[in-house]
Every structure is written in structure tokens, then in C-alpha cells.
Image (cartoon, rainbow, N blue to C red):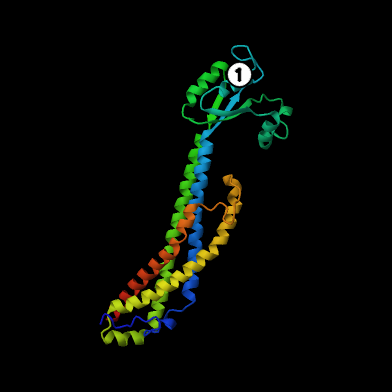
Amino acid sequence: MANWFPMSKRTDLLGLGTGLTDWLLPVLVAAMSFLAALALAGTLASATLAAQWRQDTARALTVQVTDPQAPDAAHTQSRAQAVLAALSSTQGIAGARLMSTEQLNKLLVPWLGADAAQLALPVPAVITATWQSADNTAALTASLQKIAPGTLVSTGSAWAARVAALTASVQTSAAAVLVIVALVAAAVVAVATRAGLAQRRDAIEIIHGLGALDADIAGRFAARAMMLTVIGALIGGALALPVLIWLAALAAPFSGLAPQGLVPGLPPALWLSLPLLPLAAAAIGWCTAQLTVHGWLRRLA
């Protein structure tokens, strides 16, 4: 009885066209796919942005020179200019520049007010640079303190570690969202399948009593559930795409990349991952319907 049901596309001996509605299940799966696409994009985007931020932050070098106008240890120039010259000649350090008074005031406004000079406080000179190998801070600090004692050196390694921790947290949250969406989608398919079984109970009992195999009946339900979930996933992915493009345009200033073409800022990995949503929906629909129908038929027997 393995071939109890003809394979014609127009054959619907179980009446699944009414047993599994043509609009409710795709709509619910579309909503789930929309959320899954956003969670997936968030995971990939956060990883891309964090990698860039972590690299830039880890290479950032900040040097504070106290009493910058006093002469250096060699009494040849000011402490600030001596430290700046030493940084400019150090291998692996690039872009060393002394921040102006206006720039320092802008940094200190939230804490000291509009003009730090009005408070008559000793403000150190600040030199910023990029350090390719910011792993030997102690040696750099020792060499600079020989030129200008009291000079402080700091890197962005601590901030880079915080960015990495934040990225891991965001990715974990996005993965949890994907798992929850998959479970909800499976629950939706199971409920829709059970509703279809209840609606077509009489017909199923008749053909089951005549010898139709459980696998045949489950296969019919699974095939229709898979078709409806794939349709829903395609709709959800299509609806999510313009939202993702809009969000990518908003995030472009944070990544330092200008919007390009019709798909600004969308990582290539996302284009490879989005087609997986219909495949995942098909797998969820097929497996859930199979398990639901087999369990229902076992209780029927």
C-alpha cells in the first residue's frame, strides 16, 4: 500500500487544501522568518562592526605629558615636543599628533565646563597615535619617562576587550532569538497540522482502516506543510530585505563605510545566509509535520 496515493499534483484525497489552510500558516511563518532574518543580520553585522572597532581600538595610543611646556630631561625642547618627536621616530607608531587646546577643551567640556583654562588647573598635553603592536606598553612608558618623567601611556586594549565581550553577548542573544524563532515556528506547524488532522479525521480513519501506511499519510501532510512554510519563509525574507537595507544605511556611519549601490553595508555572508531561511523553514515544516502525524496516528491505532 506504499503507493496508495497517486503522485499527481492535483490529487488531494485527504482534502488538505481545507485541512491545512493556505494563508494562516504562511503568514505566521513569514513573521517568524522576518524576525529570523533580522536576528541573523544582527549577528553578522555586529561581528563585522566589532572586528573593525576592536582592531581600531586596540591600535589606539594615547600619551599624556604633564607640565608640557617645561623643558625635557635633556633641556633641549619642551616636554611635549620631545615626547612627540620620540613617538614619531618609534618603529610601529604612526600618525602621532599633539592635540590642540581647542580639541582638549571639547573633550573636557562634559567634566570641566566650556573652558578648562578658566579653572587654572594644570592640563597635560595629549598626544594620539596609532600603534601597530600595542603589547609592550611598559617598555614604551619607560623610554618616554626618561625624556619627560611622569608621562603616562595608555592603549585601547581594555576597550577592545569590552567590545569583544559586547559582541559575544550580542551574538549569543541573536542565537537565542534564532532558536526561539525556530521553536515557535515548529509549534505553529504542529498546531496547524493537528488542526488539519482533526478536521480530516473521518477521511483519515477510513483510508487508514483500508490499509494506508502511516508514512503515506504523514508524507502528504509533511509535503503540504513544507510547501506552506517555504512560501511563508520567502515572503518573510522578501519583507525583511528592504528593512535590512535601511538599517544598513543607518549603521554605515558607525562602520566608516559610505552607502554603495542598492545594498549598502550588507555583508556578503548575509546574502549567503538568507537563502538558508526557506531551507530551514522547509526542514522545520517537514520534520514537525511528520512527527505530529505519526504521533497522532499511533494514538488513533
Secondary structure under the numbered disc 1 in the rendered image: helix
Q: Is residue 159 visible?
A: no
Vertical comparison of 245 with 32: above or below:
above
Please, which residue is most extreme toward the front here? 261
Percent position of residue 204, x then y: 33, 84
Residue type highlighted by circle 1: Ala
Left or right of residue 128, residue 106 in this image:
right
Vertical comparison of 184 with 77: above or below:
below
Percent position of residue 162, x then y: 50, 41
**In-front residue for pair 44/65:** 44
Left or right of residue 210, residue 140 in this image:
right
Q: Residue at horizontal 25%, vertical 82%?
A: 1
Percent position of residue 252, x then y: 59, 49
Q: Residues within 10 Å of mark 1 (few under 14, many from 20)?
A: many
Q: In the rendered image, which residue does mark 1 sit on?
A: 82
Q: How many marks?
A: 1
Vertical comparison of 233 with 40: above or below:
below
